[in-house]
C-alpha cells in the first residue's frame, strides 16, 4: 500500500524526506518520499510540484496525479483551505466533504480525451477513507464535520457576496483546488478523501477577506493536521469496503 498526501502548504512531518523527480506525460513533478508508521508515504505540494508557486487555476492536476500513479499510490489524502458558507462550520473547523459541485471553467478534467470513458461519481470521495479521517478526528478530539458539499470555483479571485448567496442553497464550503484533483484520482482508481480547513466565512458573511487570514489559520492548525495525518495513516487498511479500485469497470462505451 502506497499513501500520498497532497497539500497546498508544506508540512513539518515531511522534512528530511527523500526528494523524487517523477517524469509524466505532462512534465516532471517533484515529490517527497518517507517511511512513516512502516508505510511508504509520498508528499506532493500541489502548488509547487513543478518548481514554481502556481495559483489554483494553473496547477497541472493531471501531471500531479499521474506522478503519484507512477509511484504506485493507491490512497490519497488531500488537504486544502476553504471558506465557509454554512454558519455551523466556523473558522478552525475541519471539514471532510462527501460531495462537490464544480463551478470551475478552464481546467482539464480527464485523462481520457481519446475514448469515451464516463467515470461514476455517485460517491465522489472514498467512503472508507472518509470514515478513517472522521474516526481519527474523534480520537484526537478535533472539531470536525464529517459531511459537507464542497463548491469548487475557478479562482484566483475570491467569490462575490452574490455568488455566495447563490451557492448557499447548495453547498457548505467553497474552495479552488479540489476539482479536477478528485476526478483524476478516481480515473486512476485511487481512494481519495479530503481534509478541508475552514479559514474564514465566505464573502458577505464577514466584513473582509484576506489571503493573510488563510496563512494565519493554517499556521495555527498545522500541528493538528499533522497529527491527524499520522493517526489516519496508522488506521488505513489494505482491506477496505469501497469501489474506488474498480472505478473503470463498465465505465467505457
Image: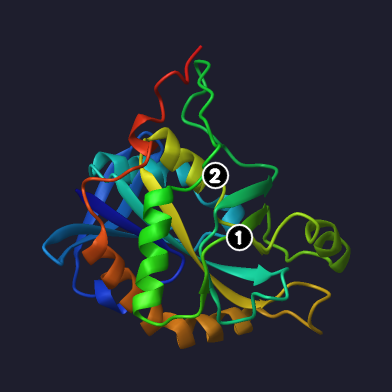
Query: Label 1, on which residue?
Result: 148
**Residue at (32, 78) in percent of width and height:** 227
Q: Give the distance between the C-alpha atoms of the residues marked 2 and 1, in whole angstroms.
A: 18 Å
Q: Where is residue 25 in the image (x, y as percent from the top left)?
A: 37, 33
Query: Residue 21 versus residue 61: which sits nearer the camera?
Result: 61
The crowding category of the residue bearing disc 2, from other C-alpha atoms within 10 Å (few below 14, some 14 to 19, many at least 20), is many
**Residue at (74, 72) in percent of width and height:** 202
> Which of disc 1 and disc 2 is earlier in sequence?
1
Labels 2 & 1 near each other (Cβ < 8 A): no
Q: Is residue 5 above or below residue 122?
A: below
Residue 135 position by quadrant = bottom left
The crowding category of the residue bearing disc 1, from other C-alpha atoms within 10 Å (few below 14, some 14 to 19, many at least 20), is some
Residue 137 position by quadrant = bottom left
Q: In this view, does 133 lie above or below 87?
A: above
Q: Can residue 11 be seen in this view?
A: no
Residue 162 position by quadrant = bottom right
Query: Residue 169 versus residue 226: which sits nearer the camera?
Result: 169
**Residue at (78, 82) in percent of width and height:** 208
Secondary structure type for disc 2: loop
Left or right: residue 39 versus residue 57 is left
Q: Position of residue 90 (x, y in %)?
A: 64, 80
Left or right: residue 191 versus residue 214 is left
Query: Label 2, on which residue?
Result: 180
Secondary structure type for disc 1: loop
Q: Is residue 234 visible?
A: yes
Most distant residue in the right direction: 162
Q: In this view, does 235 lie above or below 189?
A: below
Query: Residue 121 versus residue 220: which sits nearer the camera?
Result: 121
Q: Where is residue 163 in the image (x, y as percent from the top left)?
A: 83, 60
Q: Position of residue 120 (x, y in %)?
A: 52, 31
Amino acid at each position: 500500500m502506497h499513501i500520498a498526501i497532497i497539500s497546498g502548504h508544506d508540512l513539518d512531518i515531511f522534512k528530511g524526506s527523500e526528494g523524487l523527480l517523477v517524469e509524466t506525460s505532462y512534465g516532471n513533478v517533484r515529490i517527497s518520499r518517507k517511511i512513516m508508521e512502516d508505510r511508504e508515504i509520498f508528499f506532493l505540494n500541489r502548488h509547487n510540484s513543478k518548481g514554481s508557486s502556481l495559483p489554483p487555476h494553473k496547477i497541472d492536476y493531471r501531471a500531479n496525479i499521474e506522478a503519484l500513479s507512477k509511484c504506485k499510490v493507491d490512497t490519497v489524502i488531500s488537504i486544502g483551505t476553504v471558506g465557509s458558507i454554512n454558519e455551523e462550520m466556523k473558522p478552525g473547523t475541519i471539514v471532510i466533504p462527501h460531495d462537490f459541485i464544480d463551478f470551475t471553467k478552464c481546467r482539464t478534467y480527464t485523462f481520457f480525451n481519446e475514448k469515451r470513458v464516463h467515470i461514476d461519481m455517485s460517491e465522489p470521495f472514498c467512503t472508507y477513507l472518509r470514515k478513517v479521517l472522521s474516526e481519527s478526528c474523534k480520537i484526537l478530539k478535533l472539531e470536525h464535520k464529517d459531511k459537507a458539499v464542497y463548491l469548487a470555483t475557478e479562482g484566483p479571485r475570491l467569490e462575490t457576496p452574490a455568488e455566495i448567496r447563490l451557492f448557499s442553497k447548495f453547498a457548505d464550503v467553497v474552495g479552488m483546488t479540489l476539482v479536477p484533483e478528485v476526478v483524476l484520482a478516481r480515473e486512476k482508481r485511487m481512494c481519495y478523501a479530503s481534509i478541508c480547513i475552514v479559514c474564514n466565512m465566505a464573502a458577505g458573511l464577514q466584513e473582509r477577506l484576506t489571503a493573510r487570514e488563510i496563512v494565519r489559520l493554517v499556521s495555527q492548525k498545522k500541528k493538528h493536521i499533522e497529527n491527524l495525518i499520522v493517526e489516519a495513516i496508522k488506521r488505513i487498511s489494505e482491506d477496505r469496503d469501497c469501489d474506488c479500485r474498480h472505478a473503470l469497470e463498465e465505465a467505457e462505451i
